[in-house]
Amino acid sequence: MSNYTVKQLARLSGVSVRALHHYDEIGLLKPSFVGENRYRYYGREELLRLQDILFHRELGVPLQEIAELLAREGRDRVAILREHRERLLERVEHSRQLLRTIDRTIAELNGECAMKDKDFYHGFAPEKQGEYEEWLVENYGERMKKSLEETKAHWAQRTPEDMKGAFEQGAAAEAELAEQFAAGVDAQSLELDAMMDRHRAWVSQMWGKECPRSGYAGMADMYLAHPDFRLHFDKRGEGFTDWLTTAMKSYAARG
C-alpha cells in the first residue's frame, strides 16, 4: 500500500485537508512520517485509524471523545469492526423504517392511501426526543419547558406537509451558510446578514413564534453545548459549528 500525502488522503477518503490538519494538531491522527519536503505522509495503519475515526463520527461520537475510545479499544480491529457492523445494521433497519414512513406519507399526501395519525411518526425515536427535551429543561430551566410545550402545541395544529416544508427550508438555510463557511467568509461579516435573516426566520417558524435576536444567540449556545448539534453541523465541514455559532452571535449583537 502506498504512502499518501494530505491532499491524496483527502481525495481518497473524502475528509477535507483542513480536517486532516486538525486531526494531526489534536493528536487524533498523526502522519506516519514527515518527509524532507515537510509533507505529511500516511500509511496503511493511518488509513485504518482514519476509518475508525469516521466510523465513530458516523455513529454520533463527538470528536473530543474519539481518541479516548480508540485508546481503550486497543488493537483488536476485527472485534471493533464487528461492533461497528452491528451498530450500523441497527441504523440500517431504523433508516428502512423511516423510508417506509416517508413513502407512506407521500402516498397519503397524493391521495393514494390513508394513514392513521400514529403512523406519521413510525420510525422516529421518541426516547431521543425526550432526551433532548430533558437536556434543554435541565440546562435552561422552566422557561424552556414552557417554550417546548408551546412549540408542540403549534405543530400539533400543522400537517405533515407543513413539517416537511419547514425542514426543507431549514436545510436550505443551513446549506447556504455552509457554502459561505467553505468559501472562507468571515463569520462576523456583514454580508451574511441576509442569510442569517433567513435562518432566524426558519427558527421562528419552528418555534411557532418570533425568535428575538437574544433568543437566536441562545440557540447558538445550545448548538455549542450539546454534542449532537456539533456532530450534525460538523458533517458539513470540520469547524462549521464554531463558525455558525460565531456568525449567529455576531448577527444577534448587531440588532
Image: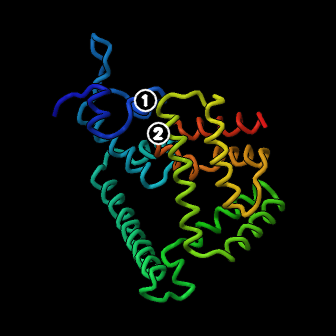
Coordinates of residue 160 in the picture (x, y in percent): 56, 74
Is disc 2 placed on a helix, strand or loop? loop
137 and 104: which one is in front? 104
Q: Is residue 35 above or below residue 236?
A: above
204 displayed left or right of 104: right
User: Given the image, on which type of amino acid does mark 2 rest?
Assistant: Gly
Return the x and y of residue 220 as percentages of the image width and height: 68, 44
Q: How far apart are marks 2 and 1 (CA)?
A: 9 Å
Image quadrant where residue 53 sits: top left
Q: What amino acid type is highlighted by mark number 1?
A: Arg
Query: What residue is at 77 percent from the left and 68 percent from the top?
Result: 150
Residue 211 horizontal side relative to residue 238, left or right: right
* Residue 162, label in figure: none
- Pick the residue in front: 191 or 92: 191
Disc assigned to residue 237: 2
**Which residue in the rendered view is the most extreme toward the top?**
36
Residue at (53, 88) in percent of width and height? 116
Give coordinates of residue 212: x percent, y percent: 79, 49
Q: Which residue is drawn at 30% across and 21% down?
A: 33
Q: How crowded is mark 1: few (under 14 residues within 10 Å), some or many (20 or more)?
A: some
Instruction: Give the quarter of the figure containing the C terminus.
Output: top right
Query: What secondary structure is marked by label 1?
Result: helix
Residue pointed to by mark 1: 18
Q: Quadrant of residue 143?
A: bottom right
* Residue closer to the observer: 109 or 1: 109
Labels 2 and 1 touching (C-beta < 8 A)? yes
Residue 16 image offset from top left, x and y in percent: 38, 34
